[in-house]
Image (cartoon, helix red, strand yellow):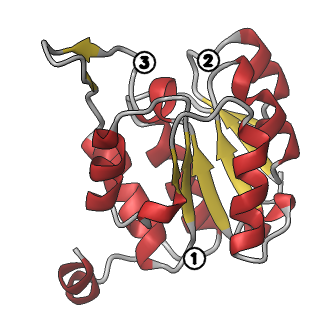
Amino acid sequence: MNLLGIKAFAFDIDGVATDGGVFCNSDGDLLRTYDAKDGFAIRMAVLNGYPVAVITGGSSESIRKRMATSGVNPDDVFLHCRNKIEQFTQFCERYNLKPQDIMYFGDDIPDVECIMAAGCGVAPADAAAEAIEAADWVTEHKGGKGCLREAIEGTLRAQRKWVFDAVAYKKKF
């Protein structure tokens, strides 16, 4: 696993950025809870110039809104994905990246192809067996409970980029 070659991050939402639980309100919108430390790690990646993508089967616009608070480009939030490798490839093309330049996080069978294509495939501790088997890195943290923070922070630390710049942070967020 070569963390020094990682130039971008991509991840699923349900089971990675969230614990997989969803609440359905009376309007039919699915509501999710996110870990604030994961959100901070995403902001640190964005602040350091890493492209970040969300590739999810979820279709709620609230996902796009939550990711915007972490600095993710709305055009890089791919909703209602049924063949995730297509969006993974679009993300690569948009930023002139090779699959090996990307760290991809996924927790279930629809993520396996992206996990295997990525330079570093990551599965949360509580992922499906197929995702764990395909992954290069299985985090100690569960989905929605710090798995994004663990691997993004680990990558930025390996690249000596886990440095907080309060002025730039305040200006960006």
- For badge 2, the amino acid type reads Ala
Image: 34 above or below 167: above
- Residue that mark 2 sits on: 127
Cβ atoms at labels 2 and 1 below 8 Å apart: no
Give the residue at the far front of this rendering: 27
In depth, the one of 59 and 137 nearer the eye is 59
Q: Quadrant of residue 125?
A: top right
Comparing marks 2 and 1, which lies closer to the viewer?
2
Q: Where does residue 72 sit, x and y in percent of width and height?
A: 42, 63
Compute the Cα span from label 3 to label 1: 32 Å
Q: Residue at x 77, y 69 (%)?
A: 93
Q: Where does residue 144 sit, x and y in percent of width and height?
A: 39, 29
Is 119 left, or right, of 23 in this rendering?
A: right
SS label for mark 3:
loop
Please rate how many residues cluster around mark 2, counting C-alpha atoms within 10 Å: few if below 14, some from 14 to 19, many from 20: many
- Residue that mark 3 sits on: 20
How many marks on residues? 3
Name the quadrant of the C terminus.
bottom left
Q: Residue at x 71, y 38 (%)?
A: 84
Give the residue at the far left of this rendering: 26
Please rate how many residues cluster around mark 3, counting C-alpha atoms within 10 Å: few if below 14, some from 14 to 19, many from 20: some
